[in-house]
């Protein structure tokens, strides 16, 4: 009868099984426990009842929990200590527990060791504490641990969350906001606590959620220079270092800097900088297409540039941008003499207008313009010298040699060509009138710039046009012969030279800086809500809450039972 009352081997098994079957099933389960990583050690079974009773003093209940804690303590002792070594009493307590003499101070010793290690070790240890069901946690710590490890509720009442003292870096509050999609509710003060240490991806998450804006200046709170420049590029692109754009992968800023520096004039057809370059070169055919690449204020500005060409009047800030001069010059065709005193642009246009009028044979218009240019002495000295030289040329053509002599004398010492022209005037004065050759520059007679290599083609075209005009044909023939004679003798000293320096008449080849859109904020380069970033925050929260989480073990109630 006694044998029939032994239920132990078959506890938890099917009551309909025979005793032999229950015993065999019990043995199979025992062998499986021994073979399991969480089962007894190889040198025999798990902790005996006496040892388990001693483990209870440390808040460790049950064989499975004891084995987990033993592995945890071995891992903690194997970890390389950080800058500050663990207290000797704590290390000794861990070793004493592993030697078979568990101590009630074990939770405090584990906490003391963890405080010297990286947060990931804390996370691993607290996972063991949670899974083993160790009563090492205060009630609040239990709730926080379960929440952080994902086994507890996602939401907690505000008063049930850690205080500012318990969560100084804001790690718990940040992970709570991420988990509950409440990043936009974080206060600036809380964000300021997290910004110095959280992964860059989470800074981007805060930016995208609107919790961190430009006025927070997060770049000042980061230690890595690349991260500082990245955040500047995202929130304050105009303050970012242009030299760092390539390093952080900010392609738009790299292109913008190259354009402003004039380093690349071959942009993809129809792209923003291709159209801006065309506008800078004076191409007016694609201005409407350019507008689609410009923000509204710059579209308005471009239209005002075009409207100004109706009267030749532009705002001072437009006139101060040399990159717009080619475009304005292409849009504006003066109908009368231009006042050079209005701006540097108008002075250059006036000089070019006078020269073009001379080349076109419109000497009356040239004289009207040159009067204004010669009288304006406050501008570029090189432009004034050109105006004086052209004025002397007109006097030379009119045989007013005394005026030409006086005019050239004022600039002869500044340029070799002006000195050569002065010598030509002196020779002509010394030559009898009837023995003097034609005064006009033969290149200009062919309506070409002085020294143009295309004079032969131009001569043939004009001869075909004037085939029935004997006087015009004779004039063209005289000009042709004078050029031929000069080229054969390689002596142009009998030709009045102008301009003195062709570069003086050139429009600037500069980018239109006031039409270039400001640098756009850099798109984010990190993955949103990266699990690895969230793990960093979770681990930090566990490490900071460690003093609250790990404390003296709770005393179990008298009904607590331990199974082997």
Image (tube, rainbow, N blue to C red):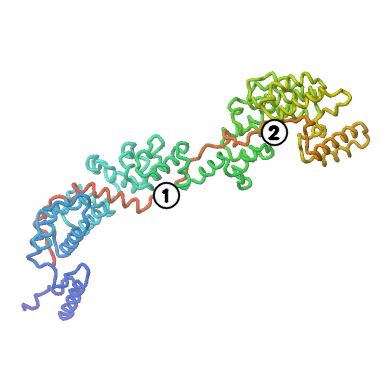
Q: Is residue 553 visible?
A: no
Reading the image, the residue beneath label 1 is: 526
527 displayed left or right of 75: right
- Image coordinates of residue 350 in percent, x first then y, are 70, 26
Tell me: residue 433, above or below residue 266.
above
Image marks 1 and 2: residues in contact by CB distance under 8 Å: no
Q: CA distance from mark 1 to mark 2?
A: 54 Å
Residue at 90% across, 33% down: 474
Location of the N terminus by quadrant is bottom left
546 displayed left or right of 359: left
Camera-side residue: 404 or 317?
A: 404
Q: Is residue 427 visible?
A: yes
- Image coordinates of residue 146 in percent, x first then y, are 25, 52
Q: Secondary structure at mark 2?
A: helix
**Residue 311, located in which quarter of the rendered image?**
top right
- Image coordinates of residue 324 in percent, x first then y, are 62, 33
Tell me: residue 492, above or below residue 407.
below
The disc at residue 17 is none
**Residue 41, located in which quarter of the rendered image?**
bottom left
- Image coordinates of residue 424 in percent, x first then y, are 77, 27
Reading the image, the residue beneath label 2 is: 502
Camera-side residue: 12 or 303?
A: 303
**Residue 488, located in which quarter of the rendered image?**
top right
243 displayed left or right of 181: right
First reached walking from the N terminus: tag 1 or tag 2 = 2
Q: Farthest left residue?
A: 2
Camera-side residue: 450 or 15?
A: 450
- Between label 1 and label 2, give the one nearer the viewer: 2
Label 2, residues with CA under 10 Å away: few <14, some 14-19, many ≥20: few
Tell me: residue 509, above or below residue 202.
above
């Amino acid at each position: 009868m006694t044998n029939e009352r032994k239920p132990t081997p078959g506890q938890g098994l099917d009551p309909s099984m025979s005793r032999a079957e229950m015993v065999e099933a019990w043995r199979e389960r025992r062998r499986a426990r021994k073979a399991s990583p969480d089962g007894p050690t190889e040198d025999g079974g798990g902790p005996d009842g006496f040892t388990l009773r001693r483990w209870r003093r440390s808040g460790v209940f049950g064989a499975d929990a004891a084995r987990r804690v033993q592995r945890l303590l071995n891992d903690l002792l194997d970890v390389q200590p950080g800058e500050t070594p663990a207290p000797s009493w704590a290390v000794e307590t861990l070793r004493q527990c592993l030697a078979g003499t568990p101590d009630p101070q074990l939770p405090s010793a584990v906490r003391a060791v963890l405080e010297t290690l990286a947060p990931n070790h804390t996370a691993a240890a607290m996972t063991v504490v949670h899974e083993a069901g160790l009563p090492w946690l205060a009630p609040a710590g239990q709730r926080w641990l379960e929440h952080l490890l994902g086994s507890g509720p996602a939401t907690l009442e505000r008063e049930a969350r850690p205080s500012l003292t318990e969560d100084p870096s804001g790690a718990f509050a940040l992970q709570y906001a991420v988990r509950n999609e409440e990043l936009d509710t974080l206060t600036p003060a809380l964000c300021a606590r997290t910004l110095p240490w959280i992964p860059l991806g989470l800074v981007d998450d805060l930016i995208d959620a609107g919790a961190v804006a430009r006025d927070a200046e997060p770049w000042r709170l980061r230690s890595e220079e690349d991260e500082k420049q990245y955040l500047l590029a995202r929130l304050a692109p105009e303050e970012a270092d242009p030299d760092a754009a390539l390093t952080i992968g900010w392609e738009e800023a790299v292109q913008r800097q190259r354009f402003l520096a004039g380093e690349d004039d071959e942009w993809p057809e129809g792209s923003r900088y291709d159209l801006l370059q065309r506008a800078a070169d004076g191409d007016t055919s694609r201005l409407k297409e350019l507008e689609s690449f410009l923000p509204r204020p710059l579209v308005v500005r471009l239209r005002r540039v075009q409207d100004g060409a109706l009267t030749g009047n532009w705002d001072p800030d437009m006139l101060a941008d040399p990159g717009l001069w080619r475009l304005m010059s292409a849009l504006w065709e003066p109908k009368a003499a231009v006042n050079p005193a209005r701006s540097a642009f108008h002075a250059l246009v006036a000089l070019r207008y006078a020269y073009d009028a001379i080349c076109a044979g419109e000497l009356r218009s040239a004289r009207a313009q040159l009067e204004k240019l010669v009288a304006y002495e406050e501008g570029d000295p090189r432009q004034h010298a050109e105006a004086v030289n052209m004025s002397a040329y007109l006097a030379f053509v009119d045989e007013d040699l005394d005026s030409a002599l006086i005019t050239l004398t004022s600039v002869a010492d500044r340029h070799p060509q002006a000195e050569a022209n002065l010598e030509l005037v002196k020779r002509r004065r010394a030559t009898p009138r009837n023995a003097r050759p034609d005064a006009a520059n033969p290149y200009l007679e062919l309506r070409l710039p002085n020294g143009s290599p295309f004079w032969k083609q131009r001569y043939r075209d004009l001869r075909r046009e004037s085939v029935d005009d004997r006087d015009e044909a004779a004039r063209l023939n005289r000009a042709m012969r004078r050029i031929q004679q000069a080229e054969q003798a390689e002596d142009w000293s009998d030709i009045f030279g102008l301009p003195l320096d062709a570069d003086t008449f050139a429009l600037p080849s500069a980018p239109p800086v006031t039409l270039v859109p400001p640098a756009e904020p850099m798109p984010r380069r990190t993955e949103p809500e990266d699990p690895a970033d969230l793990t960093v925050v979770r681990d930090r929260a566990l490490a900071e809450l460690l003093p609250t989480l790990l404390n003296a073990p709770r005393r179990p109630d008298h009904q607590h039972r331990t199974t082997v």
